[in-house]
Amino acid sequence: MKTDSLFYRLFRNHPGLALDLLGLNYSPDSYRFGAEDIKQTSFRLDGVFTPLSSDAEQPYIFAEIQYQPDPDFYDRLFSEIALYLRINKPTHPWMALVIYPTRGTERPANIGFRPFLTLPQLQRVYLEDFPNREHPTPRLGLLSLIASDPRQTLVLARDWLRQHGDTSTDTLDFIETILVYKLPRLSREEIRLMLGLEDTQLKQTRFYQEAKEEGVQQGVQQGEKLILQRLLVRRFGELPSSVQQRLQQASPEQVEQWADRFVEASSLEAIFANGDK
């Protein structure tokens, strides 16, 4: 999964996420986020949150995503920060936010840079802590999608959308993109059905707009039945004629209910149980 690009997009659209992780009470609008090349060197910082306000206490935030074990990571990070500070001479303090998938990915700094690890400016976040926990903000909940096992991701994404359904087009597209990376065997249309998006949400997504432009947004209800049937065959094999008949005769509400059950069901019986709407 292209994790660096996902985080760059997430920080660009939700700069408040870094503030949530660091426990800083500043407005997201008071920061500009972007990657920074350090002049006359080969160093490049993954992302820098630059404060836009005149508040002298509001820090620069250097954000780094480290998914691979690297014994030279901290040497490089602190060298980059020191050069950035020397060249740009900012008038604000600074903090460093490092995001790891797990604690096992982190490697100790080489001996010359180990004292830097005790700096209060350095804050480390481990994504393994995020699945299956309460999150104080919707932005932190998005981290669970990136951190989760692929088998959990659909359930977490659907729960997130149900809790925060009135969301932006960028966020809907971001969630779909995570699922496409994690579940490459599913098409965007199949993912959209599994998420159970309402029509108003669906019409905001890039998938819907592209489909509309290409003239293929026809027979939506019949298309949803065919998608669900394809998913069922993929998981359970050839469907009994009775199940095929129920699919053909199903109402949109029944298809939605069965699609909800599909995410976690381990058998056809669990999906087509009695008590359908």
Image: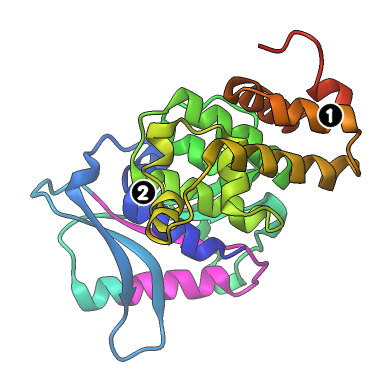
Q: Is residue 1 left or right of residue 52?
A: right
Instruction: Tell me residue 222's x, y (percent).
Output: 61, 38
N-terminal of the two: label 2 or label 1?
2
Task: Name the residue nearer the viewer: 73 or 258.
Answer: 258
Residue that lies at the very extreme toward the top in this rendered image: 275
Q: Is residue 96 left or right of residue 178?
A: left
Task: Name above or below for residue 112 compared with residue 255.
Answer: below
Residue that lies at the very extreme toward the bottom in this rendered image: 40
Instruction: Tell me residue 27's x, y (percent).
Output: 21, 39
Instruction: Tell me residue 239's x, y (percent).
Output: 88, 37
Task: Name the residue nearer the viewer: 41 or 12.
Answer: 12
- The answer to if 144 sits in the magenta stretch is no
Residue identified by numbered label 2: 170
Residue type for callout 2: Asp
Residue type for callout 1: Val
Q: Residue 34 bears which disc, if any?
A: none
Which residue is pictured at 65% across the width and 59% down the height? 106
Q: Quadrant of residue 108?
A: bottom right
Number of residue marks: 2
Residue identified by numbered label 1: 243
For discs 2 and 1, the disc positioned in front in the rendered view = 1
Q: Is residue 273 left or right of residue 182?
A: right
Is the C terminus in the top left, top right, bottom left or bottom right quadrant?
top right
Instruction: Tell me residue 256's x, y (percent).
Output: 61, 26
Task: Name above or below for residue 195 compared with residue 59.
Answer: above
Scheme of colours in the image: rainbow
Is the N terminus in the top left, top right, bottom left or bottom right quadrant?
bottom right
Instruction: Look at the image and give the residue range highlighted in magenta.
Output: 59-83
